[in-house]
């Protein structure tokens, strides 16, 4: 029910989202319901909406998968977070790709499983950058590996070119 799963809540930010969410919950949950009853009612409503709009849910999950790395509930600093996170993520992907290509996938797999676990759980639930923080040390390690391997590849290429070029 939170955020863009409800079209009428799109475009709101910060506290307005929470107020609108509480109003929507009040329309669905009868007064006096216990927390457990409220949770069951909201879960049923969520499942009903997913079944009624499966493609919309998939689209939303994909948007959340990206927002997991830079999103915030207030919308503040998202550009800053994106500019900070995406280069690290790109280098992390490069590092993972190099490791797998060089037959070191068995060493990389535990890192990737933890990262994908956090990413998937939050892509289907609530995706904000703060939830990516536990996986970032692993992403950074993969990124550093990628940078080191790139450095070695460039250095080796330069050494080969120097060895092949005639000396004056």
Image: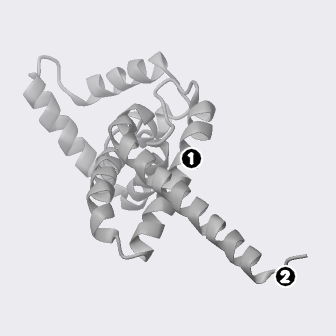
Image point 61% across, 31% down: which residue?
80
Spatial separation of the CA atoms under disc 1 and disc 2 = 42 Å
Earlier sequence position, callout 1 versus callout 2: 1
Q: Could you tell whether 73 is left or right of 25 in the image?
A: right
Q: Secondary structure at mark 1?
A: helix
Q: Could you tell whether 87 is left or right of 121 in the image?
A: right
Snapshot quadrant of residue 152: bottom right
Image point 40% across, 18% down: which residue?
19
Snapshot quadrant of residue 35: top left
Judging by the rendered image, the residue that carries numbered circle 1 is 86
Snapshot quadrant of residue 3: top left
Place of residue 91 in the rendered image (x, y in percent of width and height, measured from the top left): 54, 54
Between 104 and 50, the one lying in front of the other is 104
Q: Residues within 10 Å of mark 2 (few under 14, many from 20)?
A: few
Between 73 and 100, the one lying in front of the other is 100
Mark 1 vs mark 2, foreground winner is 2
Q: Could you tell whether 4 is left or right of 138 in the image?
A: right
Q: Could you tell whether 147 is left or right of 121 in the image?
A: right
Place of residue 106 in the rendered image (x, y in percent of width and height, measured from the top left): 27, 69
Q: Residues within 10 Å of mark 1 (few under 14, many from 20)?
A: few
In the rendered view, would you say 136 is above or below 100?
above
Number of numbered discs on residues:
2
For the N terminus, which image quadrant?
A: top left
Place of residue 101 in the rendered image (x, y in percent of width and height, measured from the top left): 44, 76
Judging by the rendered image, the residue that carries numbered circle 2 is 166
Image point 44% across, 24% down: which residue?
17
In the rendered view, would you say 138 is above or below 54?
above
Q: Secondary structure at mark 2?
A: loop
For the C terminus, which image quadrant?
A: bottom right
Q: Which scheme is used to colour this image of the protein?
A: one colour
Place of residue 11 in the rendered image (x, y in percent of width and height, measured from the top left): 56, 31
């Amino acid at each position: 029910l939170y955020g863009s799963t409800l079209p009428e809540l799109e475009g709101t930010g910060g506290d307005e989202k929470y107020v609108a969410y509480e109003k929507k919950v009040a329309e669905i949950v009868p007064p006096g319901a216990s927390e457990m009853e409220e949770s069951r009612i909201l879960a049923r409503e969520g499942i009903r909406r997913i079944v009624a709009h499966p493609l919309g849910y998939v689209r939303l999950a994909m948007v959340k998968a990206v927002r997991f790395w830079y999103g915030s509930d207030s919308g503040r600093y998202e550009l800053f977070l994106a500019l900070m996170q995406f280069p690290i993520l790109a280098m992390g992907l490069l590092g993972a790709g190099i490791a797998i290509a060089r037959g070191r996938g068995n060493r990389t797999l535990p890192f990737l499983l933890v990262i994908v676990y956090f990413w998937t759980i939050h892509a289907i639930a609530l995706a904000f950058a703060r939830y990516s923080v536990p996986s970032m040390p692993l992403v950074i390690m993969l990124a550093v590996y990628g940078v080191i391997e790139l450095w070695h590849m460039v250095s080796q290429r330069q050494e080969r070119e120097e060895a092949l070029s005639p000396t004056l």
